[in-house]
Amino acid sequence: MGSDDFTPHRRRLLDVAYRILGTVTDAEDVVQEAWLRWSAVDRSEVANPQAFLVTVTTRLAIDRLRQVRARREAYPGPWLPELISTRPDPADRAELAESVELALLVVLETLSPLERAAFVLHEAFGFSHADIAGVIGRSEAATRQLARRARDHVRAARPRFETDRGQRRRLTERFLAACFGGDLDGLVELLAADVRLVSDGGGRAKAPLRVIEGADRVGRFLTSISNDDGAQRFLVSIGLPTPAEFAIAVEDVNGGPAIVVRVGARVVLVFAVEAVDDRIGTVFLVANPEKLAAMSRPGEGAASNPA
């Protein structure tokens, strides 16, 4: 059987799988498996192809998440989701853009697989609790409880006062200027007193294995890695020749502004900030090449931009 009747649904399936799993690679594997199952099914018995495919994809994603959780627990240092390049979204896509924000995906990692699936389907895609119950194979009452627990947990873990997109971009641009301009005092002024820096090198790139806390410590670390010597040491850690020229810009990543550092066409480093009340509360630093692979291959449709 051909894939023509599967293709219209592929983007939506990647949307769902990426939000449940947090990695493009796993999401693509799950959607490929969903396609294989779709190819083997008797279509005359499928009343609603999209509902069928979302159900299959969600169940496969839940199973995959249970399998990878053990590996993530043994991960060297903090584990952060795989990043994706996103474009500014029209109003009718705003909620989907928010549902791939890095800070939210980090919080979703603390939910159980079923809680995460219930949250994603209800909050991002507007599925009813009755529909979600059919997807995950639980009663409607149990599904409501899963979704409520997930929503309460997310609300408790997210910042109380979030800045809007324009403010976040301006703050990110100021962060870039101070960080890469070696302005330690200016950088510290942008940071909340209790700021946290969470970095993911995955054992494949030079990055702290523990969270760094406090404005002074975070500021000093960031300015140290942004100077010429620190930058060249980082290149050595990921196996690139030195010296090399970096291209640095603020781009839309996972639904929000982030600092993207490239060497040629390859994305080598991303800084994303979580802003609260005009200050930076968290800095996410992603250096693991595997987590940046999707950003180095733009233009691949839903795989590189699930939102």
Image (cartoon, rainbow, N blue to C red):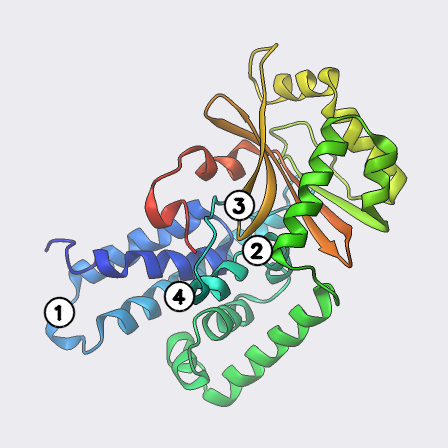
Label 2 sits on a secondary structure element that is loop
The residue that label 4 is drawn on is 58
Label 1 sits on a secondary structure element that is loop
Tell me which numbered mark, 4 or 1, is placed earlier along the sequence: 1
> Would residue 271 appear left or right of 88 to someone viewing this image?
right
Q: Mark 4, mark 3: which one is toward the viewer?
A: 3
The residue that label 2 is drawn on is 101
Tell me which numbered mark, 3 or 2, is placed earlier along the sequence: 2
Residue 284 shows up from this direction: no
Disc 4 and disc 1: Cα gap in Å? 20 Å
Q: Which one is in front, 294 or 264?
A: 264
Disc 4 and disc 2: Cα gap in Å? 20 Å
Marker disc for residue 252: 3
| Quadrant holding the C terminus | bottom left
What residue type is disc 2 on?
Answer: Glu
Disc 3 and disc 1: Cα gap in Å? 41 Å
The residue that label 1 is drawn on is 42
Label 4 sits on a secondary structure element that is helix
What residue type is disc 4 on?
Answer: Thr
Q: Residue at x 63, y 77 (%)?
A: 149
